[in-house]
Amino acid sequence: MRVLTHEAGWEALVAWLSRHQDASLIISDWVVTEFAAALSVKLRIAAIDEPVRTAIDEKFDALRQQVLRTVPISSSHFHMAAHFARRSQLGLRAGDALHVAIAAEAGAAICTTDKRLASAAAEVGVTVEFV
């Protein structure tokens, strides 16, 4: 398994993905948005150039088609995310609350390197796999 961009801790992520090649891995349309935004940031700060961005986008699209199942987002996800966000002790930002809501409704685990997200997801009953 290859990474699309090299981030802190990418080796652990590649190892985790390699161990879960046969698993049913899902992402949401929100991940697609976040990924595009992250690449735009890298482009703005000149960490990558446009040809690299295009190549990474193409690899991500291939990964989505070959390995990942993308679940659509519904208004119920946003309402559930708002419910989670209202629970201030969870410390969830809007985007993370949406991730948790989508996983909760899908009956899926949250796989993350983010300790706050993992803690909040577990608090609301979502299974967590810390990468």
Image (tube, helix red, strand yellow):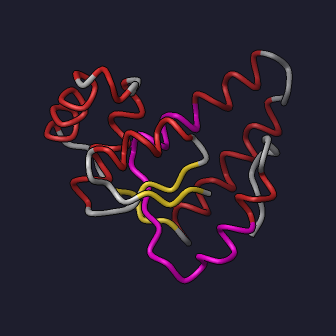
Residue at image location 46% in from the left, 39% down from the top: 117
Left or right relative to 45: residue 65: left
> Residue 115: x, y in percent?
55, 40
> Residue 35: x, y in percent?
58, 38
The quarter of the rendered structure image containing the N terminus is bottom right
Left or right relative to 130: residue 46: right
The quarter of the rendered structure image containing the C terminus is bottom right
| Looking at the image, residue 32 lies above or below residue 36 | below
| Looking at the image, residue 8 lies above or below residue 12 | above
Residue at image location 82% in from the left, 37% down from the top: 51
| Looking at the image, residue 73 lies above or below residue 81 | below
> Residue 130: x, y in percent?
56, 56
> Residue 93: x, y in percent?
41, 23
Left or right relative to 103: residue 86: left
Residue at image location 51% in from the left, 56% down from the top: 111
Q: Is residue 21 magenta?
A: yes
Q: Which residues are magenta?
A: 15-36
Q: In terms of depth relative to the viewer, which is nearer, 15 or 72?
A: 15
| Looking at the image, residue 89 lies above or below residue 5 | above
Q: Is residue 90 magenta?
A: no
Q: In terms of depth relative to the viewer, which is nearer, 62 or 17?
A: 17
